């Protein structure tokens, strides 16, 4: 079984290894699957100087960080209400949230775009973030985590005079760190790699994200018939996520296991 898992992991690694090898080899001016010979940073520097990846990075970081920060607040409040409070229609709300998890985001592109158009948020970073400021998966995940926290802790804090916000901040959030980390990783990776929605919403180069910028560059004359440039641009985009994963590899895996995400 170990050998089988190792073999499968190597198969999954082949595209990544090929992409990195091609990005850091000497430029290849043809559509070949074989990397060029010799180590070289020429592809990386050429792509970085040719395309405004600096602007794309700023846009993507703003979108990813802002989206997660707002999601942190919305899913915390929603999960707390669903986990600790009793109100009419609670079961229906939970069922709707669960159905939202099942529905793919791509199915909602048309109604989301109509909403963005009505709000005059086309071609803005806020327009890219708007449909994702709440998260059904995050709410459901945190609700399950909050329900495992002993009610006696909140009752003790209430007796000591803690208000609602203090109870959430000092009891529920610290005891759900693994769920927050797991959801944060999912949220950051999804919005960092999201392509279709930013492509539809943005029209000007100044508001493009990294994935949209890569698609535009791959079709440009600078990248035609040059695998090395396309691979270099791809590496520039995925490098931060790879670095974060290798540095916090153990903690990332433990958070997913503890939170129950598969």
Image (cartoon, rainbow, N blue to C red):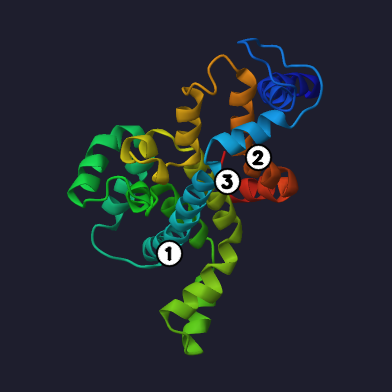
Query: Quarter-wise, where is residue 99 in the image?
Result: top left
Q: Earlier in the sequence, mark 2 or mark 3?
A: 2
Q: Nearer the viewer, mark 3 or mark 1?
A: 1
| Residue annotated with mark 1 | 73
User: From the viewer's perspective, is the residue at label 2 or at label 3 nearer?
Assistant: 2
Q: For marks 2 and 3, give the CA distance.
A: 27 Å
Is 174 placed above or below 1 here? below
Q: Earlier in the sequence, mark 3 or mark 1?
A: 1
Q: Secondary structure at mark 3?
A: loop
**Label 3 near label 2: C-beta < 8 Å?**
no
Dividing the picture into quarters, in which one does residue 232 lie?
top right
Q: Which label is found at residue 195?
A: none
Q: Residues within 10 Å of mark 1 (few under 14, many from 20)?
A: few
Residue 100 higher or lower than 64, as above or below:
above
Tell me the crowding category of disc 3: few under 14, some 14 to 19, or many 20 or more residues within 10 angstroms, Cα based.
some
Image coords of residue 140 (percent x, y): 43, 51
Return the residue nearer the eye: 106 or 178: 106
Q: Residue at x 47, y 61 (%)?
A: 69
Give SS at disc 2. helix
Per the model, the C-alpha gap separating discs 3 and 1 is 21 Å
Q: Which residue is mark 3?
A: 260
Question: Percent position (x, y) of residue 95?
Answer: 31, 47
Residue in the image at 54% along x and 41% along y: 53
* Crowd tier of the residue under label 2, counting other residues whose Cα lies within 10 Å: few below 14, some 14–19, many 20 or above: few
Q: Position of residue 49 (x, y in %)?
A: 60, 38
Give 235 or 2, whichever is nearer the viewer: 235
Q: Residue at x 45, y 58 (%)?
A: 66
Between disc 2 and disc 1, the foreground one is 2
Residue, disc 2: 239
Image quarter where the C terminus lies is: top right
The alpha-carbon separation of the residues under discs 2 and 1 comes to: 29 Å
């Amino acid at each position: 079984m170990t050998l089988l898992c190792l073999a499968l992991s190597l198969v999954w690694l082949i595209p990544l290894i090929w992409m990195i090898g091609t990005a850091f080899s000497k430029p290849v001016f043809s559509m070949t699957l074989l990397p060029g010979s010799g180590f070289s940073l020429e592809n990386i520097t050429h792509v970085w100087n040719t395309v405004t990846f600096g602007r794309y990075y700023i846009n993507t970081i703003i979108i990813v960080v802002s989206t997660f920060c707002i999601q942190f607040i919305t899913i915390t409040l929603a999960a707390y209400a669903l986990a600790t409070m009793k109100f009419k229609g609670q079961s229906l709300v939970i069922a709707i949230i669960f159905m939202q998890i099942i529905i793919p985001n791509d199915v909602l592109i048309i109604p989301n775009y109509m909403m963005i158009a009505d709000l005059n948020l086309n071609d803005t970073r806020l327009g890219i973030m708007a449909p994702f400021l709440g998260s059904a998966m995050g709410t459901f995940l945190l609700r399950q985590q909050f329900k495992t926290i002993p009610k006696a802790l909140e009752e003790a804090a209430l007796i000591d005079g803690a208000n609602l916000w203090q109870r959430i901040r000092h009891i529920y959030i610290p005891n759900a760190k693994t769920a927050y980390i797991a959801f944060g990783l999912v949220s950051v990776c999804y919005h960092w790699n999201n392509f279709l929605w930013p492509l539809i919403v943005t029209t000007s180069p100044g508001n493009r994200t990294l994935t949209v910028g890569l698609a535009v560059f791959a079709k440009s004359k600078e990248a035609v018939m040059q695998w090395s440039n396309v691979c270099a641009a791809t590496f520039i985009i995925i490098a931060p996520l790879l670095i974060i994963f290798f540095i916090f590899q153990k903690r990332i895996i433990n958070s997913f296991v503890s939170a129950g995400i598969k």
